[in-house]
Image (cartoon, rainbow, N blue to C red):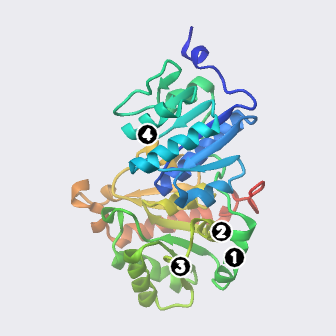
Amino acid sequence: MSLKERVGFPKPGDRVLWIRFGAFGDILQELANARNFKIRFPEVHLTFLSRLHYAELVRVQPYIDDILTGYKRPIAEWRQTVQKIKAGRYKWLISTQHGGTSSLLALFSQVERRIGSALWYIFFSKLCYHISLERWDKLYDINVFDRSVPSIFATKEDRESVLAHIARLPEPRLFAAIGAGDPWKRWPTERWIECLRPLVNEGWGIVLNGHGPEEAAIGRQLESALASDNVLNLVGALDFGKMSGVVRYCTLALGNDTGPIHLAALSGVPTMGLFNHSAPDAAMNLPNVPWFRELRADDHIREKKSAAPLKNLPAEPVIKAFGAFAEEFLPKAFAWRETGAVGAR
């Protein structure tokens, strides 16, 4: 009997739980994967498990039937999450978490069929399949990693709530994701100033996006240095839903390797990302988005990754690359975006 025959196929009405706790960019990529799964098996009931922090953005995606919130740690929260999963009576569990606590979560959930791969533990069951999503994708002909159309949507309410802020900016508008969770992924503030100033002078509207006190300080520095009414500093001002609304009014996006860049690209916004080195396809999938372009610092400077090459990346190659990017995508910048989140809650 083949592996496909042993695993079986999800049937209409089957309750499926898709697990990804974080981080923001990973959540967005897994939502895109889950969307493709739902297209392949439209009659299943698909629930997405993530941390509470991401629940509202997940909840409004039209291909998600339900949202479950939970945590891998501490142990008390882990136990509560196990109980929530058991109460959901799911027939399928799909986990893209690779750690031991997630494997044990799958084990104690007692879900009948479990798909995933883990570094520390196997999923401990003859009906549990220790295979990667890539292999599972081929088994079921799901095309789970397809990124040919936008997969993240904003509600009408979130779009309308930010329109008054965005409407005062001229077009074209640039969504500038200036921060990143890891400091070595951040392009220096002075380089951002060099890159954005010519755009401001050319009449672009600039939306500064980020979160947290460090990025708020960077946002204030950029706002002060650029000194233009065409710059809108929204660093720290947006939850994920409103951020999703903002990107839909922006023409192009530029930013570091950070969650909001995933959001822009997966929302259908032509996006250019700045990376220390080549973004791993399995983790990012952004190179598979037709409207995404990547600039790697190690193509322009000789330092190794450990030397934080993005920190040493000059503004000139970014300005040049963005110019070519804008020339390619400005004429068709809104071609991939829908007017609204059809079916969103």
| Displayed quadrant of residue 215 | bottom left
The x and y percentages for residue 66 are 68, 48
Q: Which residue is mark 3?
A: 234
Q: CA distance from mark 3 to mark 4?
A: 35 Å
**Residue 84 seen by the camera:** yes
Total numbered circles: 4
Q: CA distance from mark 4 to mark 1?
A: 37 Å
Q: Which tag, 3 or 1, sits closer to the chain's start?
A: 1
Is disc 1 in contact with disc 2, using a CB cutoff of under 8 Å? yes
Q: Which residue is mark 2?
A: 245
The x and y percentages for residue 258 are 44, 61
Q: Residues within 10 Å of mark 3 (few under 14, many from 20)?
A: some
Is disc 4 in contact with disc 2, using a CB cutoff of under 8 Å? no
The x and y percentages for residue 289 are 57, 49
Residue ID at (46%, 37%): 105
**Which part of the image, by quadrant, shows the C terminus?**
bottom right
